[in-house]
Amino acid sequence: GTTLGTSAAEKGRYFGAAVAAGRLGDSTYAGILDREFNAITPENEMKWDATEPNQGQFRWTGGDQIVAHAQAHGQKVRGHTLTWHAQQPGWAQNMSGSALRNAMVNHITQVATHYKGKVFAWDVVNEAFADGGSGGRRDSNLQRTGNDWIEVAFRTARAADPGAKLCYNDYNTDGINAKSTGIYNMVRDFKSRGVPIDCVGFQSHLGNSVSGDYQANLQRFADLGVDVQITELDIAGSNQANNYATVVRSCLAVSRCTGITVWGIRDSDSWRTGENPLLFTASGAKKAAYTSTLNAL
Ligand code: XIL
């Protein structure tokens, strides 16, 4: 293929980008998006603070705008994210215990129901594991409602939208380490007990090197019977072009690695200000990393 999306499709994969609704009116941005990408993740518009700014009052504007754009351009939508310790509305940040647990369940039900049939996959839970060597959960208001909050979130999402793939998504899990092993053990436990989980997302916010066991890590999760996806790829540093190619080749080598999403389009769109971790320059030109990515597909 001559674009990221068509090349990935030839391999049975998607190639997506995180999109900000507020940038869709920028013709350079939208031009690249619709030429190169066949999947979209809303960068912020489906998060809890955006979708339920006041308890029980839902705001669909930004997410619906992105879904409409995607449907008009034949792009799949990856929902992000039903639960997370960050970007919670103020009212939820101040909650705890059963009130917070009930609010979480209602939030998942309402959002997954609204987008039923419109998102092919949901990040049901984002970043719930701790960094470092513990392999355990991250402390958060959600975690303090009880260790079962993650399985409750997945069961709630399944009930609301039985057709969506339900994913766990995290960062610093891009190799075999204590954090990724903690998640691996959770997924294995969920599969053994029938907790509905279909996929694991590897954010892959990377720097100078790609872990030597990147592919092996994806494979060990796939071997548990879940799909794996690269969900928020961006790569800083001087070895950027080679590292993008390594990530793409690793995904293609794992049959259950179903797609790759980059976390933005141009360097000027990136949340990693000043690191220039994406595939297009601020003016929309293809970078060396673009070419190496396309060639690896
Ligand atoms: C980031 C967005 O890119 C920023 O615009 C926002 O200010 C903060 O969140 N992990 C995730 C994403 O799962 O949702 C985050 O996105 C980046 C890290």
Image: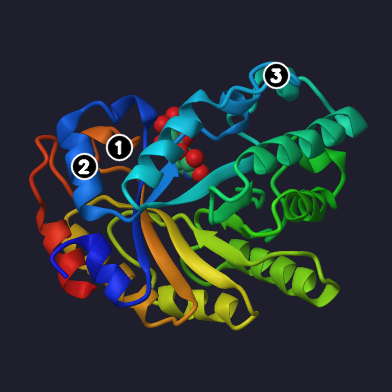
Residue carrying label 1:
270
Image side of residue 41 versus residue 58, left or right:
left
In the image, residue 128 lies at what x, y percent?
66, 49
- Tell me the quarter of the picture where residue 189 sits: bottom right
Mark number displayed over residue 276: 2
Task: Answer with mark 3 or mark 2, whichever residue precedes in sequence.
Answer: 3
Task: Answer with mark 2 or mark 1, whichever residue precedes in sequence.
Answer: 1
In depth, the one of 221 and 45 nearer the eye is: 45
Q: Secondary structure at mark 1?
A: loop
Mark number displayed over residue 57: 3
Residue count near mark 1 (Cα–Cα under 10 Å), binned few <14, some 14–19, many ≥20: some
Please report contact status of discs 2 and 1: CB closer than 8 Å, yes or no.
yes
In the figure, 246 relative to 273: above or below? below
In the image, residue 196 lies at what x, y percent?
75, 64
Image side of residue 115 versus residue 61, left or right:
right
Which mark is in front, 3 or 1?
3
State which quarter of the image contains the N terminus: bottom left
Cα separation, mark 2 vs mark 1, equals: 7 Å
* Residue positioned 72% across, 57% down in the render: 136
Q: Secondary structure at mark 2?
A: loop
- Tell me the quarter of the picture where residue 285 sits: top left
